[in-house]
Amino acid sequence: MQTADGGAHRSMNLSKDLDSNSLLYDLVVAYRIYPKVSPSPPAIYADDKLGLAELCFLSFVQALGTLRVFLHVVLDGCPAAYEAMVKRHWQQRDVSVYRGNELGNPGSYACQLDLLVRDDRSQLVLVAEDDYFYLPSAIESAVRFMQYCPEADFVTPYDHPDYTELALHRCPTTEIQHAGIRWKTRLSTTMTFFSRRSTFLEALPILKTYAAGNSDLGMWIGLTRLRHPNRLLEFYWRRILGEPFWALGSRLAREHLRTLPPLKRAYNLFAPTPSGATHMVRGLEAQGIDWDNCFIVGAKQLDTR
């Protein structure tokens, strides 16, 4: 049977493999905040990073639903107003704040990994960036899906428009429906993702390559398509980029393979349709949702700073 986008639809071994009552938390999160706006501007608060960070953080809190969560916050060179914002919306005691001195994107990501490696209070972890807007209970939906589907090694809350627009992502997919959401295996995502702690530790050598200079795409291809032999991966790059760019495709394949430590297996990454969140980059919003209206509603909830 085929999915709507032409991918294979097959059954998986589904079971509720996580005993949520056996651990202190349903989810441990490492959430990083940087006080400068991305070069790719968002649709709202394009010149106000504190406003954007607060809008996204409040949506994050509201997306947790009934989950028991411990939160690690990495403030990378942030003024005091950012920590005050976090404390205003996160009034639970289950939080630790880490202050970095402009670690930058790779450095703050490496800090997230380190925090999650050392925290074993949940079987599920979330690596989160500060420019994601979540729909209510979207994070809880992702956690419940992972509890339901043990084959979900990684999960993204973001149904990236590239999945339907770029030839790179036209590869076979597996679809699982859960609680009214269609979850499909995908090739790659951004640097906001859920993982099982066991998978996270197993895949850590490749997860670390992003902090060492690998691209997010290169990292995810290493995790989700590692079984491709060298020649097949080179052909794949050439086919995606087009024959005029065959040399670039060959170079990318060689560089990609050279950066990757060996792993035992390829991993499954699932993304939801409809999306549970969107990256705050104008033109890259997840499809099928009136995000502008969501942003306006969310902005009205913010306290006057």
Image (cartoon, rainbow, N blue to C red):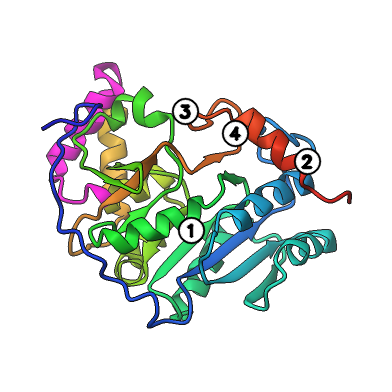
Q: Earlier in the sequence, mark 3 or mark 2?
A: 3
Q: CA distance from mark 3 to mark 2?
A: 23 Å
Residues drawn in magenta: 224-246
Toward the top, the furthest residue is 244
Q: Position of residue 104 (x, y in %)?
A: 63, 56
Please report whichever mark, 3 or 1, sits nearer to the chain's N-terminal start.
1
Q: Are marks 4 and 2 in contact (CB under 8 Å)?
A: no
Residue 162 percent coordinates (x, y)? 40, 29
- The disc label shown at residue 211, or none: 1
Mark 4 sits on what residue? 281
Q: CA distance from mark 3 to mark 1?
A: 29 Å
The residue sitting at 35% across, 43% down in the picture is 180
- Alpha-carbon span between mark 4 and mark 1: 22 Å
Kindly report which numbered mark, 3 or 1, lies closer to the viewer in this rendering.
3
Say which label, 4 or 1, has the lower sequence index: 1
Camera-side mark, 4 or 3: 3
Nearer to us of marks 4 and 1 is: 4
Dot 1: element: loop
Spatial CA span between label 4 and label 3: 13 Å
Element under disc 4 = loop
Q: Residue 256 vs residue 192: left or right?
A: left
Residue type, numbered disc 2: Lys
The residue that label 2 is drawn on is 300
The quarter of the displayed image where residue 80 is located: bottom right
